[in-house]
């Protein structure tokens, strides 16, 4: 392996070096500084005689005399089941003082695309115990469902609640015991936030079946482009080689995108919207599309990326491009949060695109889809009327309108606000939905099959009490 | 992808690699030639020539590829293989069959450097001649037929660049696509296999004015904003507003002969959904499995960006080929924005001067060239055929003022504007009826009046007027509340509510409601109009509006969509509404 001392330009996170042999695109580079530190990087562009290197740890301390070694291969993640229970830094080096990791294989972190023909459509319901999700935006195995949040909101509590409570009731009923693993990829979050996750994993015993990759706020920004790929490579290995059902939590995607922007700026690329690179959609897709199921394999990769929307603005390129790629999104809402609703999920803009095929008779319950649709419509109507009430007052509204206003209030306080520690089963969620819907006249429930109305509508509170008293 | 011949292979050397863009030196090449890049032979296309430097866009991942490796020129432009075997197939953006790739790569993940022809070269097809010895044939003429699928007879045609001549040998029998089925006196041998460069439109005699609707079975489309067979439509909307579901609905229910579905830079699972669902569904026209008329092209968001750029062309070329056979083809492209972004990404790697929002200056030209390939055509063989193109557009932040939406709207004649607010309220399909339009409406009315009902346009106009009035009234209601309105306007709001809930809304996931024939679409309107007419009579007779808007019978209007036997249901319902209202005065 040849060593060069030919650095001729250093700019932001990039180093340019002259070479006299062909160097491959994306190849891994080691740079040794004069004070003996070894920094790692990756070839971003390879031109006859000149390569641009992106240095993960940042370029500070590098000078013209630093030596550059090209390792002749692209970045690999050493994978083994023994990774479970381990804590790594953002470049995949263990930081928990544990034993050395003996890899079973080393996988390219730039995962190849899953052949769409080889995928299996995800439709296995995951019960999260959160009504806003299970009832209204059902998650399924192999889905990528991000949390759209903003600074100061309890998105971590929600993610942890999901990680803690997630179960597949159907499987449990059949006595199957599938292997479950959590991969946590942290990008640029604070030590405190990271501890929140790790402590919770420890407390619940989940750490043994977790792998943590932590790039923290004071770690180099460029490294953030690698961390999620290490996490996903590990996830794919556990899911598709070792049959685990893997839940990947990636946080905070906003920091990841900032790192992309920083590299783009250093390369003097023509920026796209709001200064983010024009290829950000493609880049994010190479992460998010690594969720899924594959025909003939047991395991699955489910992703819950978390992002904080700058300025609470969902038209910002980060949430916007994410929403265009992921299979829905869960909105954490500032107003609901200040009202004390826990978890403060705004279901109206939230969506689970894989819900339709994952619910219904034989999967969850026959009336699930109709109930969800009706609650959406009713909540939207009530929510819409709130503005009007502020102007004309409740008395000026019709009886019908007032019922919808009540529905919207009850929906938030009874259905959504369940607390971060309540694990609500799906039956309870749907029954609760019926309780609320039954305060509307039957004729209003035009999205529900008449048969289901017969079965589930709670006709009169008094009658119901009598029935149970029997 | 066509296996370009490699006889005159000229070789060059890689000079630089930057993502999907590679430059090579000493390569003797023409623009748009297909080349094989690097030791692994990754497929690419020449996109710029400057001095001794040739720039190539590579259709596969370039990690690890470096300067010094060879580049080989095939001397052929990017082409597709045309012939029997394209239906019921699923391709990537360069027409590599994804099922064959899975097999050859022996993996669920897409590897590099593996090529495969677009149609099976070994499979034998039963060829039925349509010409005899002594017949004169010219370019485009049909010389025989093979049953490609249960639904589609594949017409074997004389290639467009042939000089034609007299048939000297033809015989029915089983042939592979490369074997000669017809021999001409000029010595030309005609097989079922043609190659065609994707960036060149296939020739036709003339483009004609379309007069038939492409029936979609979607009420808001057929009823208010119809597209013609051979027409163009755009569906712009933010994420989650219903672009893909609408495209899937069209692919399932449109009364086209052939559907080409291009998943361009979108989700893998959405393509999987099509692959899993379509074989289970029946073609509404023939009752055969839907896949028998469908060709899928899947270049998902994580697949190479250059192949995303080409997938649109691969799709439209296949569509044109079936058009030449005299078929009505519908092509859905989800999403044209991802295609435009692929152009932008490559353009910026070429360091071209960026235009608006970084898109290359030729964005608008490329978009119009693409949509221009749609149309209702007279083919060179005398048949007529059509290509309808429906493109989804994904504007950043849902803002329609961005370049891709704007440039598209300048070209297409049907605009289905998706609306995030409607989607949030679960009003599906979330097509905004105030913003959308169809410039085909008038030219299609005669067809609807002849084939569905005489009062098609009249009833539609009534519905549009009510909806227009509703939007005006809603503005007032937002300020003062409904009760402050005069009684007749309160009644109009109720009528409009039924138009929205029973007519405009349609559940794509309900087994019955998912497809609504035009007759049913019309009957729903007439039912609501019965309510309207009777209720206004009653109002005139002094019945208070509170009573008129709380009938027992009217909520049933919202359930017409889910009725299989709707005629009877509607007759009874109309009677009940009339009776209930007349009983009030
Ligand atoms: N016609 C429809 N009927 C029922 N649900 C729909 C319909 N159109 C859209 N949806 C719902 O909206 C979601 C998003 O639609 P989709 O077409 O995937 O949006 P886009 O492609 O614009 O991002 C779907 O998953 C589905 O739940
Ligand atoms: Mg879509």
Image (tube, grey):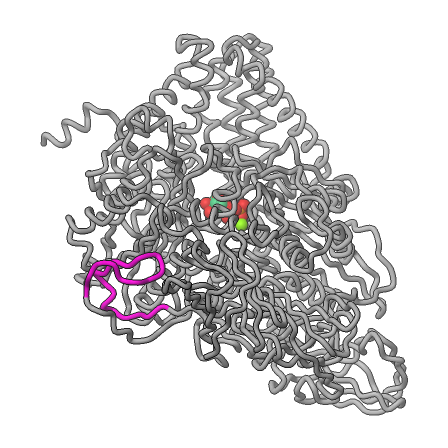
Pick the quarter of the image with the C terminus of chain A.
top left
Q: Which residue is at 50% across, 12% downward?
A: B481
- Residue B125, given in percent of the width and then of the height, sits at 64, 84
Is residue B498 rendered to the left or right of residue A351?
right
Q: Which residue is at 60% across, 68% downward?
A: A50
Q: Is residue B403 magenta?
A: no
Q: Which residue is at 63% across, 24% downward?
A: B466
- Residue B144, given in percent of the width and then of the height, sits at 75, 80
Pick the quarter of the image with the N terminus of chain A.
bottom left
Q: Is residue A199 above or below residue B251?
A: above
Is residue A434 rendered to the left or right of residue A468?
right
The range drawn in magenta is A77-98
Query: Between residues B395 and A389, which one lies in front from this camera angle?
Result: B395
- Residue B562, given in percent of the width and then of the height, sits at 48, 43
| Residue B88 at least partly seen | no
Q: Is residue B213 above or below residue B198?
A: above
């Amino acid at each position: 392996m040849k060593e060069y001392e030919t650095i001729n330009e250093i700019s932001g996170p990039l180093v340019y070096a002259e070479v006299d042999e062909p160097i491959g695109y994306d190849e891994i580079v080691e740079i040794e500084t004069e004070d003996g530190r070894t920094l790692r990087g990756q070839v971003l562009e390879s031109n006859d005689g000149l390569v641009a290197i992106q240095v993960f740890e940042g370029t500070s301390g590098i000078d013209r005399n630093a030596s550059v070694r090209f390792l002749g291969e692209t970045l690999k993640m050493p994978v083994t089941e023994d990774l479970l229970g381990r804590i790594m830094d953002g470049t995949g080096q263990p930081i928990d003082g544990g034993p050395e990791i003996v890899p079973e294989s080393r996988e390219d972190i730039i995962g190849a695309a899953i052949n769409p023909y080889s995928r299996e459509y995800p439709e296995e319901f995951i019960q999260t115990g959160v009504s806003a999700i299970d009832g209204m935006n059902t998650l399924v195995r192999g889905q990528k469902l991000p949390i759209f949040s903003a600074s100061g909101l309890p998105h971590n509590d929600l993610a942890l609640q999901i990680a803690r409570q997630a179960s597949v009731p159907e499987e449990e009923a059949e006595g199957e015991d599938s292997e479950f693993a959590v991969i946590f990829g942290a990008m640029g979050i604070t030590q405190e936030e990271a501890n929140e996750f790790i402590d919770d994993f420890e407390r619940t015993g989940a750490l043994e079946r977790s792998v943590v990759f932590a790039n923290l706020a004071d770690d180099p920004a460029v490294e953030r482009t690698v961390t999620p790929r290490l996490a996903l490579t590990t996830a794919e290995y556990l899911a598709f080689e070792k049959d685990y059902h893997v839940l990947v939590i990636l946080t905070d995607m906003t920091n990841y995108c900032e790192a992309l922007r920083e590299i783009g700026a250093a390369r003097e690329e023509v920026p796209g919207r709001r200064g983010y690179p024009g290829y950000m959609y493609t880049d994010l897709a190479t992460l998010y599309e690594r969720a899924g199921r594959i025909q003939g394999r047991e395991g699955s990769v489910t992703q819950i990326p978390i992002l904080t929307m700058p300025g609470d603005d969902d038209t910002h390129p980060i949430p916007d491009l994410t929403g265009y790629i992921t299979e829905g999104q869960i909105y954490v809402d500032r107003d609901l949060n200040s009202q004390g609703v826990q978890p403060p999920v705004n279901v109206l803009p939230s969506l689970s695109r894989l819900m339709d095929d994952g619910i219904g008779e034989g999967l969850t319950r026959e009336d699930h889809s109709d109930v969800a649709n009706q609650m959406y419509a009713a909540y939207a109507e009530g929510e819409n009327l709130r503005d009007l009430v502020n102007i004309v007052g409740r008395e000026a509204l019709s009886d019908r309108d007032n019922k919808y206003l009540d529905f919207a209030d009850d929906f938030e306080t009874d259905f959504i606000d369940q607390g971060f520690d309540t694990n609500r089963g799906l039956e309870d969620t749907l029954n609760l939905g019926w309780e609320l819907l039954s305060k509307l006249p039957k004729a209003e429930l035009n999205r529900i099959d008449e048969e289901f109305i017969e079965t589930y509508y709670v006709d009169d509170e008094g009658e119901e009490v009598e029935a149970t008293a029997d | 992808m066509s296996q370009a011949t490699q006889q005159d292979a000229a070789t060059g050397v890689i000079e630089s690699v930057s993502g999907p863009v590679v430059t090579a030196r000493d390569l003797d090449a023409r623009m748009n030639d297909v080349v094989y890049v690097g030791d692994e032979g990754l497929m690419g296309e020449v996109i710029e020539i400057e001095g001794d430097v040739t720039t190539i866009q590579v259709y596969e991942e370039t990690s690890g590829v470096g300067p010094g490796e060879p580049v080989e020129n095939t001397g052929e432009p990017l082409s597709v293989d045309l012939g029997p075997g394209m239906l019921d197939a699923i391709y990537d953006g360069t027409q590599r069959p994804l099922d064959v790739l899975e097999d050859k790569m022996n993996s669920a993940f897409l590897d590099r450097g593996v090529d495969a022809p677009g149609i099976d070269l070994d499979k034998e097809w039963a060829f039925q001649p349509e010409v005899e010895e002594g017949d004169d044939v010219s370019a485009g003429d049909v010389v025989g037929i093979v049953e490609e699928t249960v639904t589609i007879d594949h017409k074997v045609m004389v290639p467009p660049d042939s000089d034609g001549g007299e048939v000297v040998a033809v015989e029915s029998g089983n042939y592979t696509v490369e074997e000669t089925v017809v021999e001409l006196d000029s010595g030309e041998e005609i097989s079922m296999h043609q190659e065609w460069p994707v960036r060149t439109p296939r020739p036709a005699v003339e483009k004609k004015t379309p007069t038939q609707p492409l029936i979609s079975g979607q009420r808001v489309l057929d009823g208010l904003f119809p597209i013609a067979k051979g027409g163009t439509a755009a569906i712009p909307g933010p994420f989650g507003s219903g672009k893909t579901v609408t495209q899937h609905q069209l692919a399932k229910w449109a009364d086209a002969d052939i559907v080409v579905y291009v998943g361009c830079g979108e989700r893998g699972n959405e393509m999987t959904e099509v692959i899993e669902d379509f074989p289970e569904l029946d073609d509404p026209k023939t009752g055969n499995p839907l896949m028998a008329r469908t060709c899928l092209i899947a270049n998902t968001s994580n697949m190479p960006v250059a192949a995303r750029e080409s997938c649109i062309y691969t799709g439209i070329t296949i569509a044109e080929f079936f058009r030449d056979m005299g078929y009505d083809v519908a092509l859905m492209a989800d999403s044209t924005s991802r295609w435009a972004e692929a152009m932008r990404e490559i353009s910026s790697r070429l360091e071209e001067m960026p235009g608006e929002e970084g898109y290359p200056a030729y964005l608008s030209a490329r978009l119009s060239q693409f949509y221009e390939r749609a149309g209702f055509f007279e083919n060179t063989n005398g048949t007529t055929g059509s290509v309808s193109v429906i493109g989804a557009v994904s504007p950043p932040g849902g803002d329609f003022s961005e370049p891709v939406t704007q440039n598209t709207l300048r070209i297409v004649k049907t605009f289905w504007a998706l609306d995030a607010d409607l989607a949030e309220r679960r009003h599906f399909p979330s097509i905004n009826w105030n913003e959308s339009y169809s410039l085909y409406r008038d030219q299609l009315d005669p067809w609807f009046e002849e084939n569905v009902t005489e009062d098609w346009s009249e009833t539609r106009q009534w519905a549009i007027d009510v909806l227009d009035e509703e939007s005006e009234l809603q503005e007032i209601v937002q300020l003062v509340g409904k009760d402050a309105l005069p009684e007749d306007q309160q009644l109009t709001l109720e009528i409009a509510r039924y138009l929205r809930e029973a007519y405009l809304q349609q559940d794509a996931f309900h087994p019955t409601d998912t497809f609504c024939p035009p007759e049913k679409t019309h009957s729903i309107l007439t039912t609501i109009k019965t309510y309207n007419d009777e209720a206004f009579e009653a109002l005139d007779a002094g019945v208070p509006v509170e009573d008129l808007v709380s009938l027992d019978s009217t909520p049933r209007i919202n359930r017409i969509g889910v009725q299989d036997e709707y005629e009877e249901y509607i007759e009874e319902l109309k009677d009940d509404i009339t009776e209930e209202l007349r009983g009030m005065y």
